[in-house]
Image (cartoon, rainbow, N blue to C red):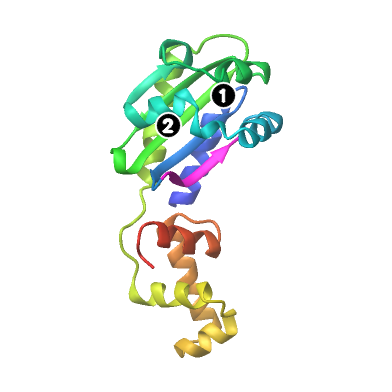
Amino acid sequence: MSKPAEMTRLLSKLGGLSPSGYSTALHIRYASPLFMDVTYPCEWIEHYTINAFALRDPMIAWGLSCEGTTRWSETGLPDPFNIMGQAADYGLQFGVSVSCGEVRSRSIIASARSDREFTDDEMGSIAKIARLLHQISEPRQQLTPAQVQALRCIASGDRYAAAAAKLGISESALKARLGSARERLMARTTSEAIQKAKDIKLL
């Protein structure tokens, strides 16, 4: 199974364990994740974003400073902006967070529900999925020279035909190089691949 297909399968399983949604921030580097997927209620995402809660979220602070698995109710961290209380108003009453990986490339995954605390078995399943997501989304540290050239042409604003002509290859060959670069970087689009390559200093 390809990495993107396996990611999709694991995220589907995570969704099944997260009645009120989940948040995945994989391989956080330079303060931003290389991959992110959030299925919390849209109203909460908007409220969270407008109020810049990511800079104040006690669960993000926990995830960046600790490795492991915890229920949101068990961290004992201060929450001066009452972010967790506000989350409960949007159906995120109970939650579990998993933090894994080195500090320089940390992944933080969270699941929420509105009816009860997560059981130990549910937490174990979520933690297993989180660690697998972290492992398979690890970006490869190298691209081939051909892939780098193709991404650089598109990043500089060239259209496919112009980029192919510049590189002396067919347009289909250019698309193949871009596709293999996306696959290697776990990117869904060429723009995303370019940004990921820049983030990990490959461009």
Could you say which is closer to the camera, residue 25 or residue 2?
25
Which residues are the magenta region? 31-39
Tag 2 residue: 129
**Residue 127 picture quarter:** top left
For the residue pair 72 and 163, the one nearer the viewer reads as: 72
Instruction: Give the residue type that dot 2 points to.
Output: Ile
Say which residue appears at 47% left-offset and 11% top-offset: 73
Give percent across and percent down for residue 78. 45, 15
Is residue 1 visible in this depiction of the protein?
no
Residue farthest top in this picture: 116
Q: Which residue is mark 1?
A: 18
Relative to the observer, which residue lies in front, 130 or 82? 82
Specify whether 147 is left or right of 92: left
Q: Which is more N-terminal, label 1 or label 2?
A: 1
Label 1 is placed on what type of residue?
A: Ser
Q: Residue 37: within the magenta? A: yes
